[in-house]
Image (cartoon, helix red, strand yellow):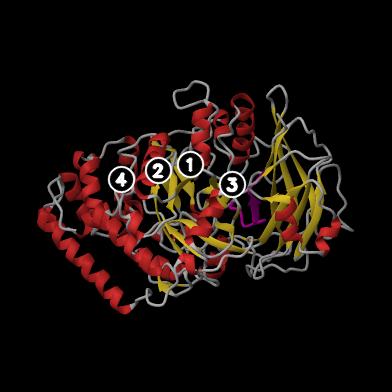
Amino acid sequence: MAMKSRWMSKAAVVALGLSLGLSLSSCEKARDLISGKKTDAEVKETEYPEQVYFGDTHLHTSNSSDAFGLGVRLGPEEALRFAMGEEVTSTTGLKAKLARPLDFLVIADHSDGLAALKAIHDAPRFLLRDPLLQRWHDELNKGPKESMAVAMELIDRFSNRTLPPDLMDPKAQLEREKGVWHDNTKITERYNTPGKFSAFNGFEYTLMRQGDNLHRVVIMRDGKDKADQVQPYSSLIGTSPDQLWDYMDGYEKKTGGKILAIPHNSNLSNGLMFQMTGPGGGPMTAAYARRRAAREPIVEATQIKGDSESHPFLSPNDEFADFGDAGWELGNLTMEHKKTPDMLAGDYVREALKRGLAIEQKTGVNPYKLGMIGSTDSHTALATGDEDNFFGKHSGSEPGKLRASQPQNLGPNGGRVGWQYLAGGYAAVWAKANTRGAIFDAMAKREVYATTGPRMVVRIFGGWDFTDADWKTNWVKAGYARGVPMGGDLKGGKGAPKFLISALKDPMGANLDRVQMVKGWVDASGKMHEKIFNVVWSDAAKRKPIGDKLPPVGDTVDLKTATYKNTIGAAELRTLWSDPEFDPKIRSFYYLRVMEIPTPRWPVFDALRYGAKIPAGARLKDQERAYTSPIWYTPKA
């Protein structure tokens, strides 16, 4: 790691490198996970996916400069140990452990300024040359309040490209970050355990134009040998998504490996994430649409900073479209620009899926053929999406008395309130084995779904000749043999498509309220439509539909004790459903939304455990949910 640096002297870099090296060496002596491990190739894959694997594709550690500035001191090793089920001590000194381990993890630290604030904090002050960096060093070493102010200033300067010249120099950044990246891939390799736990190499490309969020998480299918042939790609180098795709093309050509990107927090892009136009503002071309679809097969539809599946303004007939919207519809990520209603259509996934059909009708290619996942985007190094075990967005919002009512000042137009953060979500992947290769390939095929936290097990197959008799056989095998799973494309057939639909409750969680089919289509004139069907629900004998609506499932939440009862709802919901309004001439998509019964949100647990005062108007309970990847239908040419 002894390299030249323009903003830190060589001596300082060498000292930091020795420190990091000694730390890593001691970790290796204490915990060697390599011996006796299988390779991906040695893990037997099933004939078709028989198990769903839950994980987090979007976790930040102390190597993310915003996380470090916000106080986080846990690194990649602690993050992996926690995800695998071990107890760790959080930055604020709390014991932290998952009730159930995850199956996979992607540490996605920001490529912009990778470990920069950590290096500034650790460096001897007299070796820092820039006055701003000297001030940051001083404030980072004072305390949480001053450190947080540095993090906010860093985010603002990255957004507006006003960093010191040395930090804006891409070559200097690459030189400085190389050692950090190689240390990260070494740790990831050590914890990757094919057949038991998959640890992926990845990073976050943090493109942000004056606060308009165009971030992508980038995941590599490969191990250290290939990942080390490149470095994380920064938005200081590439200032548009297609330049990131150039980097991805180059990675695959150079290494023979595979790589994909996952857009996230489209709800904070102020209309830019899912545009109808091409990058120059003109009509989107087939070539551009094809490239985007190939490079970005899935989207992060739910996470701590809000839910991006739908919005009441776009879906006024959807009674459940407001989940996780509170506060996040006010403006972009940094609140530099307020959001106006005309921006919403470019911010939400359901609308993007409809826009994709409209673009395909004109160009022959769908740029927004997106599978859906959730992930945390936690900046604590703790990948937990559970309401009763929520460790916050960053170390300043770890469990405590004040976090639910704390203002989150992110820009000149004010901010949001702590309670508006969500305690979610997770990525659910139907794969043939728990290996990097199998999980990555399932993501590339979009055989994935999003959950806001609970681990419900959801499957859907679309076909033309399914019957109720299939439930009495191996219906999953029948689904693959005679149909397509979530993320697939229905070819033409006779009659209307039929869907095998199954949802099982989280074995440690709440019962299910209902399963809904969300259908979107574009008519011959190019107009976009949507409709939501309640396809199966609990207590069906008493809950009779009124038009397109169902009576509420009920509510057993006790806010005083932060509990609920599974005396309502169902442990399993299953049905064979056929579209009663199917038109074989119309492009369409179908995806499931699976709803739990109401349960308490994390601020209620804080009130019970810490005596937290909950702000007026705070949302205290909600219906957690899952969104599957769609199944698409395209008419015969």
Q: Which mark is residue 295?
A: 1
Foreground of the two, 320 or 366? 366
Mark positioned earlier in the residue sequence (3 or 1): 1
Span shown in magenta: 618-631
Three-letter amino acid code at disc 1? Arg
Residue 578 shows up from this direction: yes
| Tag 4–tag 1 contact (CB < 8 Å) | no
Residue ID for mark 3: 371
- State the SS at label 3: strand
Mark positioned earlier in the residue sequence (2 or 4): 4
Q: CA distance from mark 1 to mark 2?
A: 8 Å
Count of marks, rendered view: 4
Q: CA distance from mark 4 to mark 1?
A: 29 Å
Mark positioned earlier in the residue sequence (4 or 3): 4
Q: CA distance from mark 3 to mark 1?
A: 12 Å
Three-letter amino acid code at disc 4? Leu
Looking at the rendered image, the quarter that the C terminus falls into is top right
Mark positioned earlier in the residue sequence (1 or 2): 2
Mark 3 residue crowding within 10 angstroms, few (<14) / some (14–19) / many (20+): many
Residue 364 falls in image quadrant: top right
Mark 2 residue crowding within 10 angstroms, few (<14) / some (14–19) / many (20+): many
Residue 318 is inside the magenta segment: no
Task: Answer with left or right where residue 25 lies relative to residue 410.
Answer: left
| Tag 1–tag 2 contact (CB < 8 Å) | yes
| Tag 3–tag 1 contact (CB < 8 Å) | no
Task: Answer with left or right where residue 378 lies relative to residue 467.
Answer: left
Q: CA distance from mark 2 to mark 4?
A: 27 Å
Instruction: Give the residue displayed 41% in from the left and 44% down from the top.
Output: 410
